[in-house]
Amino acid sequence: MILSNGASLAAIAPILAVMITGMIVLLGDSCLKLWRQAKWVSPTISVLGLVVSAALACSLIGTSGQQLAFSGALTADAFSQACNIILAVIAALAVMGSATYLENRGLQHGEYYVLVLFSTSGAMLMAAASELIVLFVAVEILSVALYVLAGYARTERKSEEAALKYFLLGAFAGGFLLYGIALIYGGSSSIVPGQVGTTNLRALGIYLHQMPAPNQMFIAGTALLMVGLAFKAALVPFHMWTPDVYEGAPTSVTAFMAAAAKVGAFAAILRVFNAFIPISEYWLIIVQVLAVATMFGGNILAVVQDNVKRILAYSSIAHAGYLMVGISALTGSGAATDALKAEAHSAAMGGITFYLLAYGIMTMGAFGVLIWISRRGRDVQTLNDLKGLVKTDPVAAYTMLIFMLSLGGIPPTMGFMGKWFLFYATLQAGQLWLAVTLALASIISIYYYLRVVWVMCFTEPDENAVAPGRAVASGGVVVSLIASAAATLLFGVAPGLLHSLMDAASTVLRP
Amino acid sequence: MPSYAWLIVWLPLLGFLHNAFAGYLYKDLAARKKAVSYIAPGVVLAAFVVTLAVLKNEVLTAADHRVIVPLIPGLSPETPWINIAGFKANFGLLLDPLSMLMAMVVTGIGGLIHIYATGYMAEDREQPRFFTYFNLFIFMMLLLVLGSNFLMMFVGWEGVGSCSYLLISFWYTDENNAKAGNKAFIVNRVGDLGFALGMMAIWSVFGTLSYFGEKGTGVMQMAARHVDLLGNPLNIGVVTLICSLLFVGAMGKSAQIPLWVWLPDAMAGPTPVSALIHAATMVTAGVVMLTRCSWLFVQAPGALQLVGWIGLATAFVGATIGLVQSDIKRVLAFSTVSQLGYMFLACGVGNFTAGMFHVLTHACFKALLFLGSGAVIHSMHGEQDMRKMGGLKKLIPRTWFVMFIGTYAIAGFPFLSGFFSKDEILGSASASPWGNGVLLYGVGLLTAFMTAFYMNRLMHKTFYTDARFVDGELHAHHHSNFDEHEDAHGADAHAHEGANDHGHGDAHGGGTVHESPPSMMIPLYVLAVLSVLVGIVLGPTKIFEHFLEPSVARLDLGPLAEVTPLVPEIVGWVISGAIAIGGLTLAAMLYGSRKQTGELTTEASKVKNPLYAFLANKWCFDLVYNKVFITIGGKFADRVLWKYVDVRLIDGAVNGVANAVGKISGTIRKVQTGYVRNYALGILFGVVALLVGLLAQWTTLNR
């Protein structure tokens, strides 16, 4: 269904809500003195805007069908609305977790929230983009804001270094992405004789379905497109920036970056590869190799780290690997009949959607605990800082325990259910070996997650660690942590409550 | 109209949360204990009131007296709890006469026991912890009986098991208590495995775990139509397997041979625990489960027969061991085992209603007896050995009176509640569809005779014979996880004693025998009234039978036919009454003539008597289990599983892999130099790899 321009605007209302909120905060903060002085105004308005966005997405998720907005440049379907909800939740958690943290580090400026909101809208656009050019623009909207955020602690060398690294490498990868799109445009012109090229994913999907015989140019374009997205999603070997940037950026930024950028990237990967399913015999093996390399690379490298932020960075790489397994399962390559293939497809769609939400919540939670226990003037960075936390701050320690168990995929948490869904989808797709690999890689991850738990619970507090003192964060971060922890447990015990979200996401995008 | 049934389940959970976090809410111990002692019984009694309202407004007005309502208010009962790969379980509560009956027993009798426990546990410093577990137990038990599918029952099943474990070893500083908790937990695992396997078998046959569903899609509805998920006729062998596996679960939870050994040891817990969990509610879960699955069981005559034989054997064995016990609570424990055997006997001959009726009456009088014995123990400052009691009738006449009622009720004295429920069971045993009615009836009567005998023996040893202690010089045996010294100086604990209406200030010195406080006595009076009335009001009037009818399958639904009883009902009453009176009288004669010692023979002659030794050793069940599972099994575990399999194979492999991972990790981290140029090179390497890979694939496919 192709929507008129007015209806198109209505269909992407959740994204507009975020953008408009961003502009309001930008203008209000720079023009109104009162606004600037009352520190709570910007975060409050931001959270309100995000709540409105999530509510709009919730109300629109029921209007099913592939609604093509703006002549097919965006697809406002249930999947994109589901991603909007996930991203709004992540951004709201990030804003709530940031306020007092920034203030105590002397970083409290209105533009922080503006940047968070703009990059959120970029990630939302990535999830909705069905035109590769729009996808590129969305990636840049997301990234440019993130580059600035990474260097937000201007006076700290590490933060500046992180921003510069991220920017240089991001620009490098962005070039490949754009070149890939150009090659796909050129390559697609010869798929159907007499057609000019296209960069519209929907059109490409239809062409490829009718005639699954791409030429070399098209394939090379696919490879470069994959590179650009793999960089955003931090897949091995395009992951090297991740630990340095995550470590250097202020913790509140790291949390948001880790969660939102990954959700956006995977939403885009899912859209692209879903359209390319007819030619999956070309790219499937590459996706699987990337998945295995990412799972093992992330997990193995995390084992020797002593810096918690770096551990979480490698852990986020490993989780990208698990999600790639889900992408591989989309194809249902090993399933015997078409009916089974369709079943594998919808299981993978539901699984990826659930996993994205789970990943977002537990990552925000884990970084949120680090924010919570940071003290004025010093961030919690190393495992040493967490020693004996259960004695000095039991509530923080137990909350962290929940997120660590969830990230490790131990029941009764959301992380477990998410991994279970991916595992199941992979089995449905007939890719037994990949499922086994997923399980093996997760075993390695247990080591470093439990190492964090061990340090917190079974060692004595270190005197040289962050000195006890007034917490830099309170209020918002506590609320966001409690909400994340409760959601992690609740949806781990009763994943059925998210059934409608998963179902809505998996009914669209049928091949 | 929205249903309020969810409140029944959520109220005890709220109580649990309150008690668990009482430490945060009230800084002062006395205030904390006071708050807990109001909240804990309060939520259970409130749940009882809600249960009555729901029964009247929602269940009795519904078609078939059956409704399924959501566990979480506002959701539809069809909202899935888990929906994975076609496996679906709902968050529903099934309200029907069976679940309502059990909900009333659990919250009603449970509420009384909660009130009692506020008095019994008043001095314990860890009283909030006790009530935390107690409320959690009620929540789990309600989930067990009210859940609309097997999975929810299983959650409750495991939950009550955990609470049972926690409460048996409540005074964990005594190693025996901790061991008793372990024993209960481990033995129950065997049963739980059976239940879990049974559940999986049900899933594979019926494709659902819900008891009842829309348009006849529930397990029970399919079983009633003799069809499985695909509409094929049921295979009797498969149904027998399912039922047998479920029965293994029931054996564990309800202490039937061969998994009964944990129940007597479970008496190590505080007495209210024995009354609530190990007599009135949890141990009857097996009977409830069988009744819930009666639609399946009537299709599987083999499984039903197994249930009957096991029930009969357990009733008989339990009663014989009860004859020789000297610990007051252990007598009651074996009597519980034996009475549970009766209930399974009733189920085994297809009369599930009679089994449930005995569950109800037994809950009343066994709770009464346990709480009464708790009052005796409380009065005796923690003494449990009947050889050191005697003559208490004069000292604590009120306690004597309620115990007297309980004893006559369980013995089946005419027109008390035990009389009607037991007679119903014996009558249907004589009408056994297997043609062995004479045998079942005979052994059942013999067991009833023994029951009457050992219960009156208990009364004589405790109340009528001469005192075998010196009043005023009793040694305190009070259980606590803190030693006396610490306890006496725990300032707020002591302050609390004065504030309480308990009048137990002499607890730590040599004490005199005294009546229990009102908080303990009032529940006893209520239970005594129930023990007298429940039978005669609900039994002969057939009210109970009609009430439960929609929840229970008729025997003739399956291949079996009903048989007429051996004797008409009136004659049966006369025989049962005579047996009960006979047993009571024999005990009265034997012990009445030995008032001084309260013993039939000397300790020396007891030791020589092989039959006594055999019974005192509990038919050697524990000896054999120890030999086979602990000694031989332990050696196997030690030498083969641990030293060979675990240390060499598993640890070797795991440590080897872990070392390898660590080495690899240390090596490849060197790539992470921190220079942007190197990272860009990494990306370029990836680009080349991807391009080459995809183009190579293209070449292969287009050759």
Image: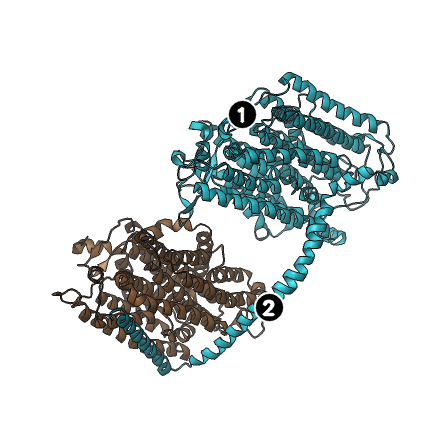
Chain colours: A brown, B cyan
Q: Is mark 1 on a helix, strand or loop?
A: loop
Q: Which amino acid is tagged 2?
A: Thr
Dot 1 crowding, Cα within 10 Å, few <14, some 14–19, many 20+ = some
Report in which chain the residue with disc 2 lies.
A
Which quarter of the figure has residue A13? bottom left
Q: How far apart are marks 2 and 1 (CA)?
A: 68 Å
At 57% from the left and 39% from the top, the residue drawn is: B247
Task: Give x and y (percent) for residue B683.
Answer: 34, 77
Q: Which amino acid is tagged 1?
A: Ala
In the image, residue B413 above or below residue B485: above
The residue tagged 1 is B561
Q: How many marks?
A: 2
The quarter of the picture where the C terminus of chain A appears is: bottom left
Dot 2 crowding, Cα within 10 Å, few <14, some 14–19, many 20+ = some
Tell me: B229 left or right of A178.
Answer: right
Report in which chain the residue with disc 1 lies.
B
Q: Nearer the viewer, residue B187 or B269?
A: B187
Asked if one can make out residue A472 in the rendered structure from this viewpoint, the answer is no
Q: Nearer the viewer, residue B642 or A124?
A: B642
Mark seen at residue A459? 2
Tell me: A427 left or right of B240.
Answer: left
